[in-house]
Image (tube, coloured by chain):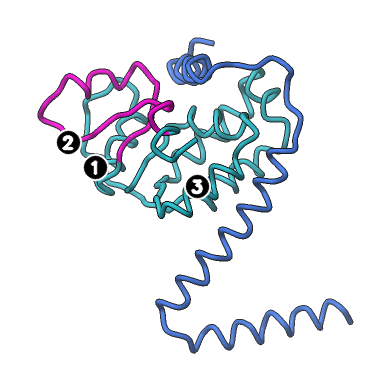
Amino acid sequence: MIQTAENNTVKEILSIIEDMPKKFQSELLRQLKLKKALQLAKKIDSSKGSKIKYSDQEIADMVHNFRIGKR
Amino acid sequence: MNFVLDTHVWISIFSNQQFEKNLIRLTDNRLRIYSFSEQLKEFADVHNKHPKISKMLPLKTQDYVNALRLTSFQIETVKNYRLLNDYKDNYRVDLSNVTKSTLVSNDKGFGILKKLHSTEIRVISIVDFYEYIGL
């Protein structure tokens, strides 16, 4: 039942957006992407990685060595 | 202003626990970040296979790939540049060229671009990028 209600909500949203101008659709997409990115940013910032902190240059060198097959 | 961030720059941003702050700064300053499908694949590859980087970024690879994809405008380019040894570096240069972006990278492989006066690609370091966005 809930699933159907959610699908109907999404369908209704889509039918409204379809009739909107392209510019509006693009702006809406941009805002939705930003909202989702901010949610992910909170999750990423609160995650606890290794205690060793690497400098930006050390990370650049790690990726460079990975690219050229030298780790 | 437009930017293309090298993959290691994304890793630095994700690992310094200021990603949200960076994102807000980018949006407030109306700066555009461009990326491309090869870069998403490269990020996933580095995250999956490099033990230090996967420890540094403990979430699932897909979370970071999604964050990269959602934060940037995806553009596919045609390979024009053949200047650099690593073919993926050439993609970054192409993307910077097509989108008229400044390339942000600390990779020494891009040193040649700084010496070539014939290209119009501007390469800046990650520190300069942070200064630009006000961090």
- Residue at image position (28%, 35%) is B93
Quadrant in the rendering for residue B53: top right
Q: Secondary structure at mark 3?
A: helix
x, y percent for residue B116: 14, 23
Q: Give amino acid for label 2.
A: Glu
Residue B3 position by quadrant: top left
In this figure, which residue is indicated by the disc labeled 2?
B120
Question: Disc 3 or disc 2, which is closer to the eye?
Answer: 3
- Label whose residue precedes the other's in the sequence (3 or 1): 3
Amino acid, disc 3: Arg
Secondary structure of the residue carrying tag 1 is helix
Earlier-in-chain disc, 3 versus 2: 3
Q: Chain of mark 1?
A: B
Task: From the image, tell me which residue sits under label 3.
Answer: B25
Q: Residues within 10 Å of mark 2 (few under 14, many from 20)?
A: some
Task: Check disc 2 and report its element: helix, strand or loop.
Answer: loop
Instruction: Report the front residue among B108 and A4.
Output: B108
Q: Where does residue B55 sit, x and y in percent of width and height? A: 70, 23
Question: Do the CB atoms of the residues marked 3 and 2 lie less than 8 Å apart?
Answer: no
The magenta-colored residue range is B102-129
Verify whether residue A32 appears in magenta. Answer: no
**Residues tagged by mark 2 and mark 1 found on one chain of the structure:** yes
The CA span between labels 2 and 1 is 7 Å
Q: For chain A, what colour was chosen?
A: blue
Q: Chain of mark 3?
A: B
Q: Chain of mark 2?
A: B
Distance, label 3 to label 1, CA atoms, is 24 Å
Q: Earlier in the sequence, mark 2 or mark 1?
A: 1
Residue designated by label 1: B97
- Discs 3 and 2 lie in a common subunit: yes
Q: Which chain is cyan?
A: B
